């Protein structure tokens, strides 16, 4: 993986100085076609306006100072080597100051930079609870096995994903409902009976039929969930959130609707979705790729934004993404993932804004150490309680 990342880095560098060969360009295209997010990142680097904006951001970085920060972080005598996964497609990876310097040296000075992330003993934590139609609870993520539901459907489970296999021979199909609740500090994947793939973030839930028996495919969510919907023009896929419904035919999109967040976000990567509000207005909004609908729960108003959608599904690929977000918002997300309790000693720090992307599967003390070195905040760690000064 490390070798592959370095190869992609070098090809992105050649893409920018126009020295890339056709073979290397074909390799980049092949990499991009592996996932919607990869393609979006390549498109982003080929967008002249986005790239010029990125260069302007680099110009205001004090590169010598930033490089000193990197040297402080990466100490050869430390037992635990520090790495940060790096791709030179944006200036917003890993706390803007740190990554911008890394990207500058990689793309413009062609330094060979190994991955700089944190090599630690941590591994992805994937645990969830599956509530069956009879009310029984099954713990997911601990073993491999098969469960048979009352309608004859089979449920295959392993440490990463639970998959539903419909029983097409059932004479009288029942509408049985299952629900997956992902535990704090975990994530899990689900494959529905129609082939739709679902990624469920920490402290999130999905309620769904074991088999889709009617003229629509409907699920209900809370928290943050990413969908890659299996196309079926005759059977629309509908996602119910606490504030509105999302109708799609076949697409990839992310929904964030945590109860304790002030806003709901729906971000479209591919295809087309239609949002219909549950309130009296019954307002309808349509999204096209790289658009995001942000709904304010306090003021009951929504707005459309043009975004790079791939930035908002980084959690699916193992990162914590934040784009000009306040420290208060960032630590609300970190609380969910790391199962920590955060207290601000100085309330004014909550409103400070940061842009960046952090490795998701590292210990919280490593993440805090990285943030401390490139910001003006200090942290005190007492078991699961974090004091921000």
Image: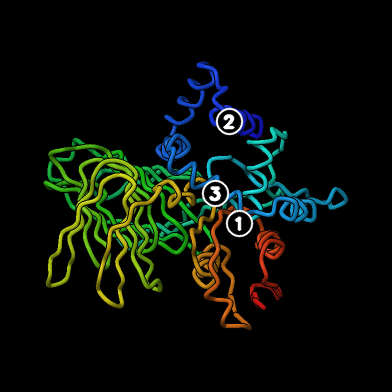
Label 2: which residue? 8
Circle 1 SS class: loop
Seen at 27% across and 67% down, the residue is 242
Badge 3 crowding class, 10 Å Cα cut-off, few under 14, some 14 to 19, many 20 or more, is few
Q: Single out the mark in the foreground, 3 or 1.
A: 3
Q: Specify whether 208 is left or right of 326.
A: left
- Report the Cα–Cα distance between label 3 and label 1: 17 Å
Q: Position of residue 109 (x, y in %)?
A: 70, 35
Q: How is the image coloured?
A: rainbow
Q: Specify whether 316 is left or right of 299.
A: right
Circle 3 SS class: helix
**Vertical side of 62 occupied by 197: above or below:** above
Q: Position of residue 351 (x, y in %)?
A: 52, 75
Query: In the depicted view, which residue is nearer to us: 212 or 359?
Result: 359
Label 3: which residue? 56
Residue 154 can be seen, yes or no: no
**Vertical side of 111 occupied by 369: above or below:** below
Q: Reading the chain from its start, which is encountered first: label 1 or label 2?
A: 2
Seen at 55% across and 69% down, the residue is 331
Query: In the depicted view, which residue is nearer to us: 382 or 135?
Result: 382
Q: Single out the mark in the foreground, 3 or 2.
A: 3
- Report the Cα–Cα distance between label 3 and label 2: 23 Å
Q: Reading the chain from its start, which is encountered first: label 3 or label 1?
A: 3
Seen at 41% across and 39% down, the residue is 40
Label 1: which residue? 95
Circle 2 SS class: helix
Q: Position of residue 368 (x, y in %)?
A: 67, 64
Seen from this angle, which residue lies furthest right? 77
Query: In the depicted view, which residue is nearer to us: 168 or 67?
Result: 67
């Amino acid at each position: 993986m490390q070798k592959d990342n370095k190869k992609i880095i070098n090809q992105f560098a050649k893409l920018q100085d126009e020295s890339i060969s056709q073979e290397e360009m074909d390799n980049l295209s092949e990499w991009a076609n592996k996932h919607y997010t990869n393609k979006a990142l390549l498109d982003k680097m080929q967008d002249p306006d986005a790239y010029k904006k990125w260069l302007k951001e680099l110009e205001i970085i004090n590169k010598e100072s930033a490089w000193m920060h990197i040297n402080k972080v990466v100490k050869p005598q430390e037992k635990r080597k520090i790495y940060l996964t790096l791709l030179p497609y944006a200036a917003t990876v890993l706390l803007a100051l740190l990554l911008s310097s890394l990207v500058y040296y990689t793309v413009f000075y062609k330094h060979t930079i190994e991955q700089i992330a944190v090599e630690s003993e941590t591994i992805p934590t994937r645990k969830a609870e599956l509530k069956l139609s009879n009310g029984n609870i099954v713990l997911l993520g601990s073993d491999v096995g098969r469960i048979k539901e009352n309608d004859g459907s089979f449920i295959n489970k392993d440490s990463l994903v639970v998959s539903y296999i419909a029983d097409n021979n059932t004479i009288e199909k029942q509408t049985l409902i299952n629900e997956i609740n992902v535990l704090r500090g975990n994530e899990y994947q689900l494959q529905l009976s129609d082939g739709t793939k679902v990624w469920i973030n920490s402290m999130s839930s999905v309620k769904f039929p074991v088999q889709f028996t009617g003229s629509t495919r409907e699920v209900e969510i809370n928290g943050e969930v990413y969908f890659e919907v299996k196309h079926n023009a005759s059977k629309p896929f509908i996602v119910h959130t606490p504030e509105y419904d999302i109708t799609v035919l076949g697409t990839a999109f992310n929904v964030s609707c945590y109860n304790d967040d002030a806003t709901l976000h729906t971000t479209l990567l591919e295809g087309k979705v239609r949002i219909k509000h549950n309130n009296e207005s019954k307002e309808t909004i349509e999204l096209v790729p790289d658009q995001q609908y942000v709904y304010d729960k306090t003021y009951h108003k929504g707005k459309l934004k043009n975004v790079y959608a791939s930035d908002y599904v980084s959690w699916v690929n193992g990162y914590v993404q934040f784009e000009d977000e306040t420290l208060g918002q960032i630590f609300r997300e970190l609380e969910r993932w790391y199962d920590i309790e955060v207290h601000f000693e100085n309330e004014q720090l909550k409103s400070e804004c940061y842009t960046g992307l952090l490795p998701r599967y590292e210990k919280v003390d490593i993440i805090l150490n990285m943030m401390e070195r490139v910001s003006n905040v200090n942290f005190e760690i007492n078991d699961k309680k974090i004091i921000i000064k």
